[in-house]
Amino acid sequence: MNLYQKIVEQQTELICRFKPDGTLTYVNKAYCDYFNKRREDLVGHSFMPLIPAEDQPILNASLASITPENPVTVVQHRVILDDGSTRWQEWTDTFLYDDDGNFIEGQAVGRDITGRRAIEDELWQANNTLNSFFDVTPMMMLIVDFDDNVLRINDHFNEVLGYSDVNVDDFVLAAITKPEDLPLIREVWDNLRTVSTSYSLEFSLIAKDGTLKETEWRFASDLQERKVFCVGRDVTIRNQRLRQKRIHDAQFRQIVNTIPDAIVYAKPDRTISLVNEGFTNLFGYDPKEVYGETTQFMYADPERYYQTGKREFSGNAKKRYAPSTIEFRRKNGETFSGETIGVSVVDEAGETIGLLGISRDITARIQMETELHELNRSLELRVEQRTEEIQTLVHKITHDFRAPIRAVNNYLTFLEEDCADSLDAQALGYMAAIQENANYMGRLVQDLLTYSKVRHTRDYTFAPIDLNALVRNVVLRTDANELGRVEVPETLPNVHGNAQLIEQALVNLIDNATKYVSSGKTPEITITIEETATHWGICVSDKGIGIPEQHLGKIFGMFERLHAQNEYDGTGIGLTIVHSVAEVHGGHVDVTSTVGAGSTFKFYIKKDLITHEQSN
């Protein structure tokens, strides 16, 4: 073995020689070891079976490209080992030609590149993934070298700015950048060239249509590759909304600060995050002193603070709370009464995320209300006193009037008994007129006394009333059955009220029904009951002379009479008493009437009456 052969045998690379048909004429030890074959099993045999069928065209194409002028080629392909596994190899093939240019023998030097190919495959896959991400990401992406040359632009960048098929060789980023932003970008760019770091920056780019696109960018530099990787997004709409929000927030704060009441917004943990100027004016605290603090310092009574928290920050909190009065404490220690309205702030799921409280100082109002209450009570006492005085006066007047009326009636009786035979017809007529007027005067005094009692008595007692018994008793007391016909339902309900007053009202209504009929006509009276959700209505209908429509509104007035005394007897107080009795019972009186056909009076009393003592 000569020196050349020794050197070849000691090489770690795979070395072989082969004929034009691929038959091996020589292989070194490294070749044999690699394929785990003896030299005699390789020499004299073609190497093509060692190569997978799908890779053989690659090798053949590479060998066919060799010419006497270019006798060397490099090719990569797989080989099949003795155990059936495959490995990657890289071969440098050199062809030897004779003087006539005929290929006589080839020599090849190879090495295993399986590991390198795996790394290259991984790099290719990573690069392919990066390229896919670069193309499909909804972010704007650029790769720029340190000489400001744009190396790559993704599709989303073009979509945002309205460009298409941009030639990176002609693209200059500064040309589409808002001029006012260039100095800041240049400063960041200079830093990226010297330090491997990253920056965040916002600036505006000029779109193809001339509009400005506000963009947000993240820059990262690679000093070894001398590249800057740029990732950005269009924040035009976001910034517009932020500006609108700032405007709305400013407007909201201006509106809130113009409200003189104290406004406090607290989070679910009851810490304060917003107050207005009205709060500062009312409580004396600067906003910075209370932000992040709970609202407990506002309360004069700690127990009230905890009670309010249980009510307004519980799981079943309401959205709005009725006004409540709370004793508050100012920064200087003074306490005051505040009227507070609370409104829960909830999220889309209905969960409470805070509470907005609006408070005002009502100390002066409470003092005024107290004084007004005391004044009203004083006036009520004075009214009661005056009422008692009026009742006493009425009783005295009626008593004083009754005495001379009784005297007149007595003297008329004496005259009639002792002197009737000596009086002529004219004198007897005078006596009858005197008697009639004295009786009218007596009825008038009695009606005035009754009206006074109804109007000025304050402590009526209301109790259950059997209307069946009461109505039948009234019919018996009046001349209704003797003078005409009265229809009463077989069953009447029990009501709640003052039996004496209701009886008086019914007496007056039935008396009128029997009185106001045409001459020679028999009175016909019907009593019925109406029920509403809140009242009972006792209805008295007749078929009398009726009331003209223009007079219906005034018939309940004091001393209102539609007829002369010599036509229909009456004092003009009866319906006034009926109206007052209805008012005492929380009701009213309605009337419908047709001239010549009759009238219906509906006397309403409330169902849920309480006595004067109960109301206090």
Image (cartoon, helix red, strand yellow):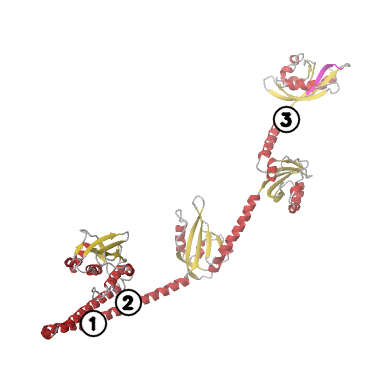
Specify the segment rendered in magenta. Answer: 101-109
Q: Which amino acid does the dot numbered 2 rest on?
A: Glu
At x 84%, y 19%, the residue is 96
Label 2: state its secondary structure: helix
- Main SS of the magenta part reads strand
Q: CA distance from mark 1 to mark 3?
A: 137 Å
Residue beneath disc 2 = 384
Residue 133 belongs to the span the image colors magenta: no
Examine the rendering and report whether any part of residue 459 can be seen.
no
Q: Which amino acid does the dot numbered 1 rest on?
A: Phe
Say if 440 sits above or below 185 in the image.
Answer: below
- Label 3 Cα neighbours within 10 Å, binned few <14 / some 14-19 / many ≥20: few
Q: Nearer the viewer, residue 29 or 341?
A: 341
Q: Nearer the viewer, residue 246 or 8?
A: 246
Residue beneath disc 3 = 116
Residue 403, image x, y percentages: 20, 83
Name the mark on residue 401: 1
At x 60%, y 60%, the residue is 250
Q: Which amino acid does the dot numbered 3 rest on?
A: Arg
Label 1: state its secondary structure: helix
Say if 185 sits above or below 572 in the image.
Answer: above
